[in-house]
Image (spheres, rainbow, N blue to C red):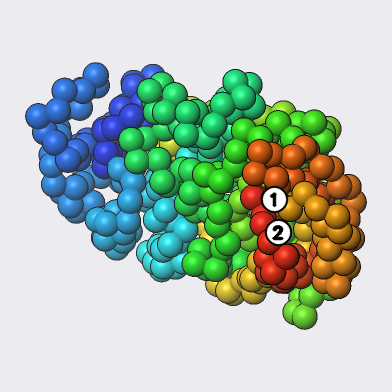
């Protein structure tokens, strides 16, 4: 008996949606019943027989089995997806913001209605990471997940290093080439990476993550000088999404989840990921360390993940009462997320200080009084205004102590140009 075609509706025919339509032409077991767009008059390089500008026609269409949401944002995506779930439709989405903010409600509703929500494309574009964590790596207890989760910022930092130019110059180049949006805030201020690390932490640590408790810092303060000095010291600077289980804390299972630039030793494999590529590094037992890398965005890489999810549903559709049980979110316990001020890190500090006797001694005294050991100290010359640039790398210290030391140094006319944590 010939298998029934899986009938899908697509919400969004932008870059990703168009890529999905193009790739699905290769599969006879999938039928695109309808697509929803914002502008019916916009010219597109793909054709769908039935197009509407009312996405609720998709989620309420009784003929559709799977709703593919690739429009992004939370409004009206949340109402659309929850309506579709209530109508017993499976969901495939690339919407990282929606999952980070409303994943708990969506997954619970999906379980109540016995449908699957798949979202491989929502974390790292074309990189297969959600599936492996939920299936082949399911036997692991993870202690850490870290990643370069945003191609725009990785491209900018790579070009700042290669061309020795400022962030502002490089951003303009990235925008001209289409690597950065006209409003790049979501990328360069770390929001995109924050949404993605929230989802990764959710599935690796089996806890509900509160995205509002994730510390977030972008790359706008990184200078070409920081990148050059880091290179001289044996490091690369990358925007990292980090989630790790902190042992020995006040409560078992404390999670340290954050997004910010980090100095990474050149020997570390994640430091070698350049341009618009993404990477996800997992640490746990028994796998030890494993890294996934590849294109984190773009028409066909993202479409690859979306279509993969669609085909997984197609493979089980009409053959079982519960489709893809391993992919379902069944944990409900909220994570205990610690504030960044209680985290421990090594630090890179670019310091502007008076070029006078006793300045280095003041630095040593203030750091010592705040439980901070200096690993290395380097003076980078004297500027025309009579100030010296001093670079300090610390040993591991508490964020609270570092921030307190910075406040104390201000009383001595010692300013911090930049603070970057070291991975």
Residue 168: x and y in percent read 47, 34
Residue at 18 percent across and 52 percent down: it is 56
Residue at 19 percent across and 47 percent down: it is 55
What residue did someone put label 1 on? Answer: 352
What residue did someone put label 2 on? Answer: 414
Residue at 86 percent across and 55 percent down: it is 357
- As drawn, 251 above or below 66: below
Residue lying furthest bottom in this view? 250
Q: Is residue 41 left or right of residue 183?
A: left
Query: Can the viewer see residue 281?
Result: no
Label 2 vs label 1: CA separation? 6 Å
Q: The residue tagged with tag 2: helix, strand or loop?
A: loop
Binning the other alpha carbons within 10 Å of mark 1 as few (below 14), some (14 to 19) or many (20 upward) gives: some
Residue 209: x and y in percent read 55, 66
Residue at 51 percent across and 63 percent down: it is 211
- As drawn, 34 above or below 210: above
Q: Is residue 177 left or right of residue 51?
A: right
Binning the other alpha carbons within 10 Å of mark 2 as few (below 14), some (14 to 19) or many (20 upward) gives: many
Q: How many marks?
A: 2
Q: Which mark is residue 326?
A: none
- As drawn, 69 above or below 305: below
> Circles 2 and 1: CB distance less than 8 Å?
yes
Residue 13: x and y in percent read 26, 33
Q: Quadrant of the N terminus?
A: top left
Name which of mark 2 and mark 1 comes first in the sequence: 1
Q: Is residue 416 left or right of residue 153?
A: right
The one of 367 and 261 positioned closer to us in this rendering: 367
Residue 187: x and y in percent read 46, 43
Residue lying furthest left in this view? 41
């Amino acid at each position: 008996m010939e298998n029934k075609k899986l009938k899908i509706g697509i919400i969004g025919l932008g870059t990703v949606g168009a890529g999905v339509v193009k790739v699905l032409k290769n599969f006879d077991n999938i039928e695109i019943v309808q697509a929803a767009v914002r502008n019916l008059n916009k010219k597109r390089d793909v054709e769908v027989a039935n197009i509407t500008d009312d996405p609720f026609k998709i989620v309420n269409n009784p003929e559709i089995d799977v709703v593919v949401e690739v429009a992004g944002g939370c409004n009206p995506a949340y109402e659309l997806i929850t309506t579709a779930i209530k109508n017993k439709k499976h969901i495939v989405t690339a919407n990282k913001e929606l999952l980070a903010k409303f994943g708990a409600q969506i997954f619970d509703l999906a379980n109540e209605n016995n449908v699957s929500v798949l979202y491989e494309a929502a974390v790292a574009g074309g990189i297969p990471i959600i599936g492996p964590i939920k299936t082949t790596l399911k036997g692991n207890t993870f202690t850490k997940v870290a990643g370069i989760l945003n191609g725009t910022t990785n491209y900018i930092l790579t070009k700042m290093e290669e061309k020795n130019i400022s962030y502002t110059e490089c951003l303009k180049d990235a925008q001209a080439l289409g690597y950065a949006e006209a409003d790049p805030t979501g990328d360069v201020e770390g929001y995109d990476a924050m949404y993605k690390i929230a989802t990764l932490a959710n599935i690796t640590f089996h806890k509900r993550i509160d995205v509002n408790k994730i510390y977030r810092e972008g790359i706008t303060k990184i200078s070409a000088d920081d990148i050059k000095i880091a290179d001289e010291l044996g490091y690369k600077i990358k925007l990292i999404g980090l989630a790790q289980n902190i042992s020995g804390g006040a409560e078992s299972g404390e999670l340290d989840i954050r997004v910010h630039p980090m100095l990474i030793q050149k020997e570390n494999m994640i430091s070698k990921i350049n341009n618009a590529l993404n990477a996800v590094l997992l640490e746990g037992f028994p796998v030890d360390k494993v890294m996934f890398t590849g294109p984190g965005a773009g028409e066909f890489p993202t479409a690859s993940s979306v279509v993969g999810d669609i085909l997984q549903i197609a493979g089980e559709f009409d053959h079982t009462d519960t489709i893809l049980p391993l992919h379902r979110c069944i944990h409900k316990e909220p994570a205990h997320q610690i504030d960044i001020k209680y985290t421990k890190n090594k630090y890179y500090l670019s310091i502007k200080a008076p070029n006078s006797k006793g300045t280095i001694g003041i630095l040593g005294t203030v750091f010592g009084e705040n439980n901070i050991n200096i690993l290395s100290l380097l003076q980078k010359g004297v500027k025309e205004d009579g100030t010296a640039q001093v670079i300090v790398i610390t040993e591991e210290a508490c964020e609270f102590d570092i921030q307190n030391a910075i406040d104390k140094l201000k009383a001595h006319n010692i300013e911090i140009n930049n603070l970057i944590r070291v991975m």
